[in-house]
Amino acid sequence: MLHETLNYFFIWGKDVDKLPINYGMFSLKGDKAVANVINKFLSTAVPSVAIGGIPVGQARFDILQDESFKTPGGNYYDLFIGHIEKPLPSNPLPDYFFEPGNYDS
């Protein structure tokens, strides 16, 4: 779900007027935590002037999977979002991404 969300909004530059709330976590608290981080990134990165000058598709995909970037803890992107060889299609995200998840507690 995380990879699909970044693909749709960041790589393909889709409008960030409505962002996902369901990331398949085991709790509402977990989904909210992931959604807050991803939504902050998308709300900041997608409309930025720097990103706006980069063509959607492969060029943005290459930025997202750039191995020269590491987190402050020394981790690479693939630990968080995995790795694929090319961008996913820009298909709309499923409705359930925008609906609360099914939680046991």
Image (cartoon, helix red, strand yellow):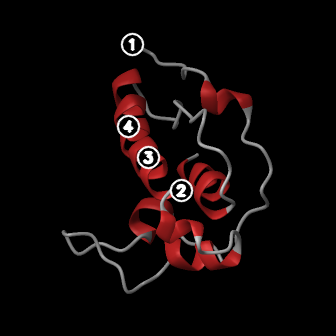
Of callouts 2 and 3, the N-terminal one: 3
Q: What number is the disc on residue 46?
A: 2
Q: Residue 10's x, y, as percent? A: 58, 58
Q: Is residue 60 above or below residue 43?
A: below
Q: CA distance from mark 2 to mark 1?
A: 34 Å
Task: Name the amino acid type tagged 1.
Answer: Ser
Which residue position holds label 1?
105
Q: Amino acid at mark 3?
A: Ile
Callout 2–callout 1 Cβ contact below 8 Å: no
Which label is found at residue 38? 3
Tell me the element at label 2. loop
Label 1 secondary element: loop
Disc 4 target residue: 36
Q: Nearer the viewer, residue 102 or 1?
A: 1
Q: Could you tell me how far apart the alpha carbons at marks 2 and 3 are, in whole angstroms?
A: 11 Å
Residue 32 to residue 53: above or below: above
Q: Position of residue 94 (x, y in %)?
A: 73, 36
Give the spatial CA distance, label 3 vs label 4. Answer: 6 Å
Within 10 angstroms of label 3, few (less than 14), some, or many (20 or more) residues?
Answer: some
Pointer 4 or 2: first along the chain: 4
* Alpha carbons under labels 4 and 2: distance apart: 15 Å
Q: Is residue 64 above or below residue 103?
A: below
Residue 57 lies in what quarter of the image?
A: bottom right
